[in-house]
Image (cartoon, rainbow, N blue to C red):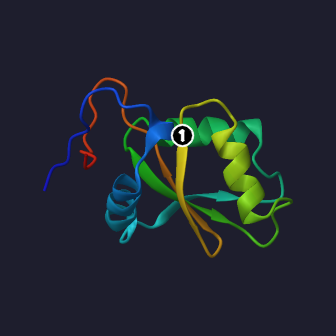
Amino acid sequence: MTHYIQGSRPISDLTSKARAHLRKLAHDLKPILQIGADGVSTPFLESLEEAFNTRELLKVKVLDTADVDRKEAATAIQEAGLGMEVVQVIGRTLVIYRPHPEDPEIELPQ
Protein backbone atom coordinates (compact mmCIF):
# COMPACT_ATOMS: atom_id res chain seq x y z
CA MET A 1 0.00 0.00 0.00
CA THR A 2 1.50 3.35 -1.06
CA HIS A 3 0.97 6.40 1.12
CA TYR A 4 1.18 10.03 -0.01
CA ILE A 5 1.42 13.23 2.01
CA GLN A 6 -1.08 15.98 1.27
CA GLY A 7 0.08 19.49 0.41
CA SER A 8 2.86 21.09 2.36
CA ARG A 9 1.65 20.67 5.93
CA PRO A 10 4.26 21.87 8.45
CA ILE A 11 5.71 18.91 10.33
CA SER A 12 5.27 20.54 13.73
CA ASP A 13 1.50 20.56 13.14
CA LEU A 14 1.19 16.77 13.30
CA THR A 15 -2.17 15.85 14.74
CA SER A 16 -2.70 12.97 17.14
CA LYS A 17 -4.24 11.00 14.24
CA ALA A 18 -1.18 11.68 12.09
CA ARG A 19 1.15 10.59 14.90
CA ALA A 20 -0.88 7.41 15.44
CA HIS A 21 -0.73 6.69 11.69
CA LEU A 22 3.04 7.18 11.63
CA ARG A 23 3.49 4.97 14.72
CA LYS A 24 1.49 2.25 12.97
CA LEU A 25 3.65 2.50 9.83
CA ALA A 26 6.83 2.39 11.93
CA HIS A 27 5.81 -0.66 13.95
CA ASP A 28 7.65 -3.21 11.79
CA LEU A 29 10.68 -1.02 11.01
CA LYS A 30 14.09 -1.89 12.42
CA PRO A 31 16.43 0.84 13.74
CA ILE A 32 18.86 1.89 11.00
CA LEU A 33 21.03 4.26 13.04
CA GLN A 34 22.40 4.27 16.57
CA ILE A 35 23.24 7.08 18.95
CA GLY A 36 26.39 6.10 20.82
CA ALA A 37 29.07 7.70 22.96
CA ASP A 38 29.29 10.78 20.72
CA GLY A 39 25.60 11.55 21.24
CA VAL A 40 23.71 13.59 18.66
CA SER A 41 26.85 14.83 16.93
CA THR A 42 27.33 16.48 13.55
CA PRO A 43 28.39 13.17 11.91
CA PHE A 44 25.28 11.47 13.36
CA LEU A 45 23.02 14.25 12.02
CA GLU A 46 24.71 13.96 8.61
CA SER A 47 24.01 10.20 8.61
CA LEU A 48 20.42 10.87 9.63
CA GLU A 49 20.05 13.43 6.84
CA GLU A 50 21.44 10.87 4.37
CA ALA A 51 18.98 8.22 5.61
CA PHE A 52 16.08 10.56 4.87
CA ASN A 53 17.13 10.68 1.20
CA THR A 54 15.57 7.24 0.70
CA ARG A 55 12.79 7.11 3.31
CA GLU A 56 10.46 9.37 5.27
CA LEU A 57 10.08 7.35 8.45
CA LEU A 58 12.79 5.60 10.41
CA LYS A 59 13.84 4.33 13.79
CA VAL A 60 16.98 5.26 15.73
CA LYS A 61 18.32 3.33 18.71
CA VAL A 62 19.89 5.12 21.69
CA LEU A 63 22.64 2.84 23.00
CA ASP A 64 23.42 2.36 26.69
CA THR A 65 26.82 3.95 26.03
CA ALA A 66 25.28 7.20 24.71
CA ASP A 67 26.18 10.37 26.57
CA VAL A 68 22.52 11.51 26.31
CA ASP A 69 19.33 9.81 27.38
CA ARG A 70 16.52 9.08 24.95
CA LYS A 71 14.53 12.26 25.64
CA GLU A 72 17.62 14.48 25.35
CA ALA A 73 18.43 12.79 22.05
CA ALA A 74 14.88 13.36 20.78
CA THR A 75 15.04 17.03 21.72
CA ALA A 76 18.47 17.47 20.09
CA ILE A 77 17.25 15.90 16.84
CA GLN A 78 14.15 18.12 16.66
CA GLU A 79 16.15 21.24 17.52
CA ALA A 80 18.81 20.49 14.88
CA GLY A 81 16.77 22.51 12.38
CA LEU A 82 16.59 19.76 9.77
CA GLY A 83 12.78 19.56 9.67
CA MET A 84 12.58 16.23 11.47
CA GLU A 85 9.80 15.35 13.87
CA VAL A 86 10.23 12.77 16.63
CA VAL A 87 6.94 10.91 16.46
CA GLN A 88 7.51 8.52 19.34
CA VAL A 89 10.05 7.61 22.00
CA ILE A 90 9.56 4.05 23.15
CA GLY A 91 12.16 2.36 25.28
CA ARG A 92 15.50 3.40 23.81
CA THR A 93 14.09 3.73 20.29
CA LEU A 94 13.05 6.94 18.54
CA VAL A 95 10.63 7.06 15.61
CA ILE A 96 11.49 10.02 13.37
CA TYR A 97 9.54 11.44 10.43
CA ARG A 98 10.38 13.91 7.70
CA PRO A 99 8.46 14.09 4.43
CA HIS A 100 10.48 13.96 1.25
CA PRO A 101 10.66 17.56 -0.07
CA GLU A 102 10.01 16.69 -3.72
CA ASP A 103 8.28 13.29 -3.81
CA PRO A 104 6.52 12.54 -0.49
CA GLU A 105 5.10 9.03 -0.13
CA ILE A 106 3.30 8.97 3.22
CA GLU A 107 -0.24 10.34 3.29
CA LEU A 108 -1.18 11.73 6.68
CA PRO A 109 -4.81 11.60 7.82
CA GLN A 110 -6.71 14.89 8.02
**Residue at the left extreme of this rendering:** 1
Does residue 77 appear left or right of residue 51 in this picture?
right
Residue depicted at 28% across the width and 47% down the height: 108
Q: Which of 17 and 53 lies nearest the eye of the viewer?
A: 17
Kindly give the residue lying farthest to the top in the view shown. 102
Q: Is residue 17 above or below residue 77?
A: below
Residue 94 image offset from top left, x and y in percent: 58, 61
Q: Residue at x 42, y 35 (%)?
A: 53
In the displayed structure, 6 sits above or below 65; it is above
Measuring from the top left, give residue 79's x and y in whole percent.
Answer: 69, 37
Amino acid at dot 1? Met
* Residue at x 64%, y 29% (from the top left corner): 81
Query: Which secondary structure lies at badge 1?
Result: loop
Residue lying farthest right?
67
Image coordinates of residue 89 in percent, x first then y, are 59, 65
Answer with left or right where residue 76 lies relative to residue 33. Answer: right
As drawn, is 89 to the left or to the right of 62?
left
* Of residues 9 and 74, the one drawn nearer to the viewer in this rendering: 9
**Tally of numbered tags:** 1
Q: Could you tell me which residue is drawn at 15 percent across and 50 percent down?
A: 2
Observer-nearest of 22 and 34: 22
Badge 1 crowding class, 10 Å Cα cut-off, few under 14, some 14 to 19, many 20 or more, is many
Residue 42 in the image: state x and y as whole percent. 74, 36
Looking at this view, is 36 or 105 the one in front? 105
- Residue behind mark 1: 84
| Quadrant of the frame with the N terminus | bottom left
Q: Is residue 57 left or right of residue 72?
A: left
